Image (cartoon, grey):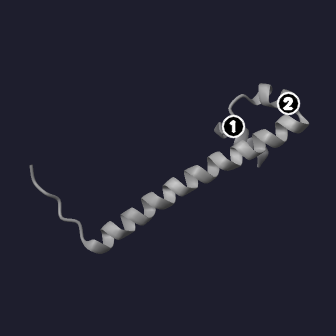
Amino acid sequence: MQTLEVPCSELLLLRDCTQLDAQLKQEKVRLINQIRDVLWSCYPQLIDLYGDLGHPWVLQLWK
């Protein structure tokens, strides 16, 4: 097995990108949960209709 040498600047950029990706995924989950809570208090039947509020077609509908 050969060790892969990655330049320091590229490794730092990769770490930053993976951290940002994880943060954005957490933010998406948080916002979807927030939407679900608001919908449940106002229109609980919409949650049954939509099912997964994180599904791409549901998010497009909200746009």
Separation of residues labelled 2 and 1 (CA atoms): 19 Å
CB atoms of marks 2 and 1 within 8 Å: no
Q: Nearer the viewer, mark 2 or mark 1?
A: 2
- The residue sitting at the right extreme is 42
The label number, if any, that marks residue 40 in the structure image: none
Q: Position of residue 10 (x, y in %)?
A: 32, 69
Q: Which residue extends farthest bottom? A: 9
Mark 2 burial class by Cα count in 10 Å: few <14, some 14-19, many 20+: few
User: Please, is residue 50 above or below residue 30 in the view?
Assistant: above
Q: Give the residue drawn at x 54%, y 57%.
A: 23
Please name whichever residue, 8 or 61, is drawn nearer the observer in this view of the structure: 8
Is 53 placed left or right of 15 in the picture?
A: right
Question: On screen, 12 above or below 57?
Answer: below
Residue at left 77%, top 44%? Answer: 35
Q: Residue at x 63, y 45 (%)?
A: 29
Q: Earlier in the sequence, mark 2 or mark 1?
A: 2
For residue 44, which numbered disc appears in the image? 2
Dot 1 falls on a residue whose secondary structure is: helix
Q: Is residue 60 above or below residue 18?
A: above
Q: Indicate left or right for 5 with 22 as reference.
A: left
Q: Residue at x 43, y 65 (%)?
A: 16
Q: Say which amino acid is labelled 2.
A: Pro
How far across and down, in percent of the image, does residue 41 sit?
87, 37
Q: Residues within 10 Å of mark 1 (few under 14, many from 20)?
A: few
At mark 2, the secondary structure is helix
Amino acid carrying mark 1 in the image: Trp
**Where does label 1 land, which residue?**
57
Percent x, y for residue 34? 75, 46
Residue 15 is situated, as x and y percent measured from the top left of the image, at: 38, 63
